[in-house]
Image (spheres, grey):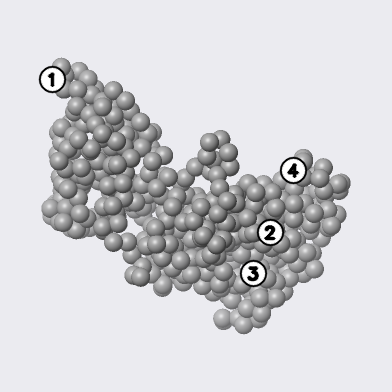
Amino acid sequence: MPVCIDKAEFKARREHLLSLIGPNSVAIIPAASEVTRSRDTDYAFRQDSDFYYLTGFNEPDAVLVLSTHSETPSTLFCLNKDKLAEIWHGRRIGFEKAKKDYLFDQTCALSELTEQLLNLVNGQQILFYAQGTYPSFDDKVWSLLGTLRSNRTLKAPTTIKDISALIHEMRLFKSPAEVNIMRKACEISAQGHIRAMQFATPGATEYQLEAELHHHYAMHGARHPAYGTIVGGGDNANILHYTDNCDALNDGDLVLIDSGCELQGYAADITRTFPVNGQFSEPQAQLYNIVLAAQEAAFTEVKPGGSLAKANKLAMTVLTQGLIDLGILQGELHELLASQACKAFYMHGLGHWLGLDVHDVGDYKQDEKERSFEPGMVLTIEPGLYISLDAKAPEQYQGIGIRIEDNLLVTEQGYENLTQSVPKSISEIETLMSLKAN
Ligand code: GLY
Ligand code: MN
Ligand code: MN
């Protein structure tokens, strides 16, 4: 199967969403805009994930309108062709080509948005729109509603509903084509981690390991990381979202790398923790094996009918018992579990959905209850233990932060670990690191 999504799949998603919004409804879904980084320079453009999911269209400022009332159910507004703008800023597809290439029923130049939107929304009962996501676009929508309400020949929708939940429920279940891309994103990322492990050495800087990962991603077709890469040596690993990545790596420390590439919009999200010099010390190995055992316990709940909450309970039991065994927690297991004592050293959740966003969309609860896993969902399982230099713990464990994170696809039988190629046991890591790349 090719690693891309056919335009017909994007069209089928729009048709499915149209069936969900029901009769006499119109949905407006704006694309992202460019964001200024500093004078005259922008951040790398990243399309809005919901818009991308429904269109596959990667230009800024476009707008998708879905209407169950019109002869043209799906309309795309996109930037006009403009010779001068294209000389300065890059090529634009233009609305004529976009219609054919992206299978829309109708496409219009963005310059016609105000007028055409009025026609598309006028007379519909329900407007589906995710207010608050893009405040400047909200202004356009409120102004449109104002015009419709104030003109007696026009009729504004009487109900405004958030479109997000409908799209997010669709996005939670990955199609075979999406899974294929995610498998590839995970494999590229896995090999990037292997490369970084082989380059790690005392004196190298955290940002140099970051560069090894990013180099590998780009050389294998994934230009951007999916989020800010974390490379934390020693006590820096205890800062959960550490992205400074500016320190030198010390002999005798562990280094935690949390990084994944973005491939065709889809994220991988892998964490590995390993010794800078290639050999775990005894206290490092003791803590590491507890986190690994917690992850393995959590994996057993990743199957249809299992849930993140059940998996987390198993992980917390292993972490808590492990901390008792090392003298970091004192007391009875059941009491420490009841008081969630291990949260002092494991401050985050066990995992999250993964997809177009690294912390992907989709409800974690259903009918007020923990949501059960179903085939087609993709999630991370990422237990950790963080004993900072000033933690109340025996000295030999202070300054050690460990997280192990893999990406799992829920299948009919259980799960497929999409990131299993990165070594994880102590012996696998030590063997790999003895085969230095440099
Ligand atoms: N990389 C962010 C996370 O693991 O959730
Ligand atoms: Mn991560
Ligand atoms: Mn994660």
Residue located 49% across and 56% down the image: 375
Image coordinates for residue 425, horizontal then vertical, percent: 68, 71
Q: Which quadrant of the figure has residue 435?
A: bottom right
Q: Which residue is mark 1?
A: 153
Give the residue number, with chain letter if any, for mark 3: 424
Query: Who's the residue at 57% across and 81% down the image?
Result: 438
Which mark lies nearer to you, 4 or 2?
Answer: 2
Which amino acid type is shown beneath numbered disc 2? Ala
Discs 1/3, front = 1
Structural crowding at the residue carrying mark 3, measured as other residues with C-alpha within 10 Å and reported as few (<14), some (14–19) or many (≥20) = many
Residue at point 70%, 53% (across, down) = 314
Q: Residues within 10 Å of mark 2 (few under 14, many from 20)?
A: some
For the residues labelled 4 and 2, the Cα–Cα distance comes to 18 Å
* Total numbered labels placed on residues in the image: 4
Compare marks 2 and 3 and give the one earlier in the sequence: 2
- According to the picture, the residue beneath numbered tag 4 turns out to be 340
Q: Is mark 1 within 8 Å of ligand 1?
A: no
Distance CA(mark 2)–CA(mark 3): 15 Å
Disc 4 or 2, which lies upstream in sequence?
Answer: 2
Mark 4 residue type = Gln
Q: Is residue 136 visible?
A: no
Q: Earlier in the sequence, mark 4 or mark 3?
A: 4
Q: CA distance from mark 4 to mark 3?
A: 27 Å
Q: Quadrant of the N terminus?
A: bottom left
Reading the image, the residue beneath label 2 is: 297
Residues at marks 4 and 2 touching, judged by CB atoms closer than 8 Å: no
- Foreground of the two, 264 or 227: 264
| Circle nearer the N terminus (4, 1) | 1
Image location of residue 17, percent across then percent down = 31, 44
> Up-down: is 150 above or below 304?
above
Q: Residue 309 in the image: x percent, y percent? A: 63, 46
